[in-house]
């Protein structure tokens, strides 16, 4: 490859091992970080969670390839065309029609490969999973009303009778218990500022806006304890606004629900209307 | 790179670093805070009731130069003198009592922080009805009613130390967080909270008693925990009758044996569930009801170690049906109760299978539900 005389740039170096280095570095470091729960998202615990992982790795791979290309395209010409004994530095403003065409073609290909591809897959995920709110009248759907505030989560489940606003409504603060393998559907709102209900292991995140009721759902497929976090900066103690999500196996959950409903009925104070904040379920 | 003096650049960076560090050290001084909101300036200081002589004796050990005992004070009864002038002993309406001076400056500092951190739930004027506190159960405290639940002190009103501890630890299972502010900030907020007592009540009342902490005595059961649990179970269902409000963790028959009642005695319905109780605490002019916890189910607000439980049971929960047990039963029995309750929490709380086997067993074998 002659470096002295070329006037049009040579892209032969793209075939070299130069390209592999940044690509390998980026993918392996992302993979390594993703293995550690503190950095990566960990294994999904909801049925649509795997879609998140697929999208994440698609974007990471595409971005890594683009990054590797850009790095190589920057560094190699800088070395190749630099000034050194017997060689004047050569440079190009990219004003020729050829260069403009090249730029346009690269841009269009980049858009189609990166943005359009990701957009199509993301929209498919949203339609098929995230926006596919389960029907409220399906008895399998476990409904939860969430009232957020600075800086706590209040959860209300309908209890054994399945009706909101009755004495056996199960009220919990910063703790939510749900059944495994049943869709959990949320009605979300806030008293004061915007919060965001984030269940990282379930790959679910949805804002709670004061004055509006937002919808979200997920279906847990793993038993255990998971995190509830606030993902919207909501004031001084935002960092302390977290809770515990417990997923129980169906039989255990039914027992839990019956007991929680009974205890809720015991604690119910009929005259304390200010404390009864349930609303009609929104679909 | 002619024209740039590298040494000059280094000096400039150093100066910048120095400025930053000066800025930081100023931030760490809690009294140099963000510009104040002039609408929140408190113009008058306040005299607030202070704890009794025992508390001063404790403080005097920590700060020997500051507090001295004067045998001639309080009309010859003797009392403590604060050389800083913050605390003073004076006679009002024939009552000798210690008072603490909270300056307008200090109350202003406290109010600024109160409005920033506390008012969203506790309300701008401390009435316990801020925007985020609405519909919330349990309700945020109103600082105008002078009823504080988890103080771990003997008297009605908590000491500064007791309030500080509640604020720093938070109340588990409620939106009252463990607050991560400096002690100086928190103590200023506490003075402001105390100054919210209406005239002639709470910390502004000469007849109020500000409490000494319940001392955590030595646990007599450290080597005999099993026996403590057995003893605690007897006290719980026997002498202390905890099962009248909290769940009974026994069958009717077992309860009859523990209480040495005659055959055929019946007890309250739903013995294995708690019973809703009245409290003196009001929300929007209405007395609220309080649910005594089921230890195998509900979250303890003020700690789950035996020492925490000892203090909570000993002091009682002010304004509710839970009385002060210190003095009513011996410390040995208090510790046994603490061990028994701790054992219930450790064995069954958040363990659905173990709990339903235990509670289910009580409900099947007795006629209680």
Image (tube, helix red, strand yellow):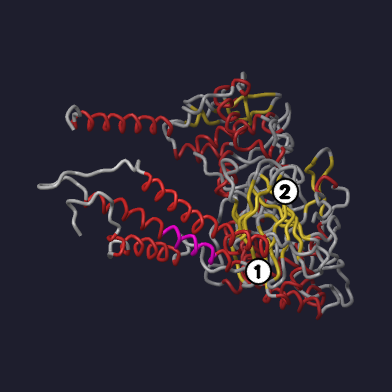
Q: Chain of mark 1?
A: A
Classify residue B188 as left or right of residue B282. Answer: left
Residue B247 vs residue B217, the one in the foreground? B247
Residue under the image location 57 percent in, 60 percent down:
A200
Front-most of A231 and B161? A231
Give residue B122's quadrant in the image.
Answer: top right
The local secondary structure at tag 2 comes to strand
* Outermost residue, left side: A85
Q: In x, y percent, where is residue B165?
A: 56, 46
Magenta residues span A53-64
- For the stretch drawn in magenta, the main secondary structure is helix
Q: Nearer the viewer, residue B210 or B176?
A: B176
Which circle marks residue A189 in the picture? 2
Query: Which chain contains the residue that carries disc 2?
Result: A
Q: Which residue is mark 1?
A: A220
Question: Looking at the image, is B208 positioned above or below residue B88?
Answer: below
State the residue at coordinates (61%, 22%). B42
Residue B245 visible from this viewpoint: no
**Residues at discs 2 and 1 both on one chain:** yes
């Amino acid at each position: 490859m002659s470096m002295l005389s070329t006037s049009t740039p040579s892209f032969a170096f793209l075939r070299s091992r130069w390209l592999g280095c940044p690509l390998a570095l980026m993918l392996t470091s992302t993979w390594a970080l993703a293995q550690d729960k503190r950095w990566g998202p960990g294994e999904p615990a909801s049925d649509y969670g795997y879609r998140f992982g697929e999208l994440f790795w698609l974007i990471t791979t595409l971005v890594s390839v683009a990054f590797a290309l850009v790095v190589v395209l920057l560094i190699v010409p800088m070395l190749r065309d630099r000034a050194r004994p017997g060689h004047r530095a050569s440079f190009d403003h990219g004003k020729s029609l050829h260069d403009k065409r090249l730029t346009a073609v690269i841009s269009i290909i980049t858009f189609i490969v990166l943005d359009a591809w990701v957009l199509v897959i993301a929209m498919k995920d949203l339609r098929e999973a995230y926006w596919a709110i389960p029907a409220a009248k399906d008895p399998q759907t476990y409904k939860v009303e969430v009232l957020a505030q600075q800086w706590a989560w209040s959860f209300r489940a309908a209890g054994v009778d399945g009706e909101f606003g009755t004495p056996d409504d199960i009220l919990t603060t910063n703790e939510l218990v749900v059944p495994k393998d049943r869709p959990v559907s949320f009605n979300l709102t806030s008293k004061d500022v915007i919060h965001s209900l984030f269940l990282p292991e379930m790959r679910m995140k949805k804002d709670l806006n004061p004055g509006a009721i937002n919808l979200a759902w997920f279906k847990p497929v793993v038993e255990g304890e998971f995190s509830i976090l606030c993902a919207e900066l909501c004031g001084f103690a935002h960092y302390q606004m977290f809770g515990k999500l417990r997923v129980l196996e169906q039989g255990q959950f039914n027992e839990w629900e019956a007991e929680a409903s009974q205890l809720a009925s015991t604690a119910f104070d009929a005259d304390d209307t200010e404390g009864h904040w349930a609303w009609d379920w929104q679909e | 790179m002619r024209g740039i003096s590298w040494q000059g650049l280094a000096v400039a960076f150093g100066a910048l670093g120095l400025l930053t560090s000066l800025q930081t050290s100023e931030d760490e001084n809690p009294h140099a805070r963000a510009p104040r909101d002039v609408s929140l300036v408190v113009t008058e200081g306040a005299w607030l009731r202070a704890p009794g002589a025992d508390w001063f004796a404790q403080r005097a050990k920590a700060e020997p130069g500051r507090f001295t005992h004067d045998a001639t004070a309080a009309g010859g009864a003797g009392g403590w003198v604060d050389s800083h002038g913050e605390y003073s002993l004076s006679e009002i309406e024939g009552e000798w009592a210690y008072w603490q001076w909270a300056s307008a400056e200090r109350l202003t500092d406290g109010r600024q922080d109160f409005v920033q951190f506390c008012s969203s739930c506790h309300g701008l004027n401390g009435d316990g009805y801020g925007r985020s506190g609405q519909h919330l159960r349990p309700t945020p405290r109103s600082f105008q009613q002078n009823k504080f639940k988890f103080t771990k002190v003997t008297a009605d009103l908590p000491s500064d130390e007791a309030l500080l501890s509640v604020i720093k630890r938070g109340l588990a299972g409620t939106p009252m967080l463990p607050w991560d502010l400096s002690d100086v900030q928190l103590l200023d907020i506490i003075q402001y909270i105390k100054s919210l007592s209406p005239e002639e009540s709470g910390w502004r009342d000469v007849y109020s008693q500000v409490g000494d902490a319940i001392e955590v005595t030595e646990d007599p059961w450290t080597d005999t925990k099993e026996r403590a649990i057995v003893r605690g179970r007897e006290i719980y269902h026997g002498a202390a009758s905890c099962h009248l409000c909290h769940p009974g963790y026994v069958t009717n028959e077992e309860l009859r044996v523990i209480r040495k009642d005659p055959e055929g005695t019946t007890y309250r319905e739903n013995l294995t569930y708690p019973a809703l109780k009245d409290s003196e605490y009001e929300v929007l002019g209405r007395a609220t009801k309080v649910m005594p916890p089921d230890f195998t189910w509900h979250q303890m607000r003020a700690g789950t170690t035996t020492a925490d439980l000892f203090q909570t049971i000993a002091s009682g929960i002010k304004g509710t049906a839970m009385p002060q047990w210190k003095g009513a039963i011996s410390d040995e029995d208090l510790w046994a109760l603490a061990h028994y309750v701790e054992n219930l929490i450790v064995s069954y709380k958040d363990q659905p299978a173990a709990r339903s086997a235990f509670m289910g067993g009580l409900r099947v074998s007795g006629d209680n539900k």
